[in-house]
Amino acid sequence: MNRILIQDGLLVDTEWTRHADILIEDSKIVHIAAKIDPDTLPEGTEIVQAEDMCVLPGIIDAHTHYHLVSRGTVTADSFEEGSRCAAFGGVTCVVDFADDDKKGNLAACAKARSTAMGKEMAVDFSLHQGVYAYREGLEEELIQLKKAGVKVIKMFTTYKDVGYLVDDQEELRKIFALCKKYDLLVSVHCEDDATIQKVNSSYSGPYTPPSHAVLRPSEAEARGIDTVGRIALELDMPLYVVHLSSKAGLQKVRELRAKGLRVILETTPHYLFLDKSKLEGEDGPLYVMTPPLRSKEDNEALQEAVLNGEVQIIATDHCSFTREQKLSSKDVRTILPGIPGSEELLSLVYSFAANSGRIGIQQVVNLLSTAPAKAFGLYPQKGSIRVGSDADLVIFDPDMAWTISKENIHSASGYTPYEGMQVIGKPIMTYLRGRLIMGDNIYLGRAGHGEFVPQDDVGRGKTIMH
């Protein structure tokens, strides 16, 4: 039996914080106490000193695209390389995506994705399942998908050109109604396709990276949120909005919440801390993602929303391409969209919290671990420090000041969008189900050790919704 005693750390759970010892046996937390005498434990118990450190539940990156095949190529970070980024960032579980092949078997799509991930992932994972069309038999597909342990679907209000958009409003409503019937959580990429098409039809160029924010305006995000929000409100069901990028989108969420809509709201570090000025210059293509980077005013509005509790989850939308892939085009219509971010997530958000002085480390744990676990039906197996939970733990140095650089970040993309940002706080050791996968800046993850985590009650806990 693998047995580890972590001593003298500050244990931080969303519900409590205390100095205590924590005992792990094999994959689970089995005992938490103010003091656990190592002399009472069997010979061979590993002792880990965590004095002056915080012990956090493993971070859950609720929005990733590892090994994404797109536009005739594949992202830089494979499942194995994405796992490495995750481990260095204290991330022990990710929620990735399975595409809808529109062949009438969503459970098979999810199974194919989870099987591929299971061969290479070194951290645990769960899934969102794309639904890109209404069809006869969809109800049975959703029933089988739920039995397969996937209870979150992903939809789009844009990308009609690549077949992601359900354009017929009645069909969209039917999909939502089926998801309500079977207690499936609907997550949506919200950008109104008609608004984008209208802007594009009257635009005459240039198509350089700075034009991305013009071609996909924040008004499109707000209208996309309005479209799906009205349907969810009518059906009295919750809605998960992914990667909110704008003040206009935030205002629309506020309006819908005022009418009674339950919204789980996700944003990302790049929409909090980067603005569209990054799109200028030779490296502009490196910062193209969808939705686009917006203004400092948008950054500030979203930061305030995090601080006042309007945002429930911060995830990364990690979708990395190499510098060479990104810089192979200067035309925003063909630049590969997406950036890395799993590794930087915890340090960026903790630094923001520490610098603001308005939220503490417990709120950081909630934003990055507990709330995602509850939203996606992984709690309390994940996202919690309690007896019986998985021993997914991060030993975190809250006082370590460091500068983010491509030299100390491990994405195969070869760059970080947060280059030169000074942060405080760094994961020192990452445990996945009781096994050390990163320690002292050494990666110890094993491809294939990551496991698929079936989803239980999604959207659980009204405390994570406004």
Image (cartoon, helix red, strand yellow):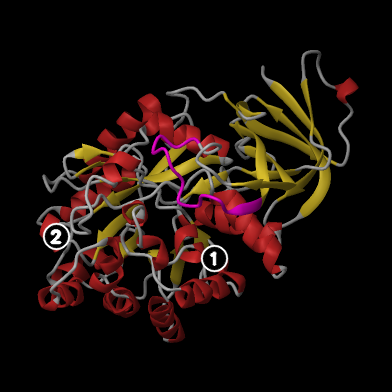
Residue at mark 2: 134
Q: Is residue 15 or residue 183 the one in the foreground? A: 15
At mark 2, the secondary structure is loop
Give the extent of the magenta segment: 410-423
The quarter in which the N terminus is drawn is top right
Kindly tell me whether residue 411 is visible in this rendering.
yes
Q: Residues within 10 Å of mark 1 (few under 14, many from 20)?
A: many
Q: Residue visible at 83% across and 21% down?
A: 41
Q: Residue visible at 22% across and 45% down?
A: 106
Residue at mark 1: 464
Q: Residue visible at 46% across and 86% down?
A: 258
Is residue 179 shown in magenta? Answer: no
Is 32 rendered above or below residue 339? above
Say how many tags the image has. Answer: 2
Q: Residues within 10 Å of mark 2 (few under 14, many from 20)?
A: some
At mark 1, the secondary structure is helix
Is 411 rendered above or below residue 242? above
Question: On the rendered structure, is 78 left or right of 328?
Answer: right
Question: On the rendered structure, is 118 left or right of 429?
Answer: left
Amino acid type shown at disc 2: Tyr
Question: On the rendered structure, is 66 left or right of 165?
Answer: right
Q: Position of residue 108 (x, y in %)?
A: 22, 38
Q: Is residue 299 or residue 95 the one in the foreground? A: 299
How far apart are the two marked residues, 2 and 1, measured between alpha carbons?
A: 30 Å
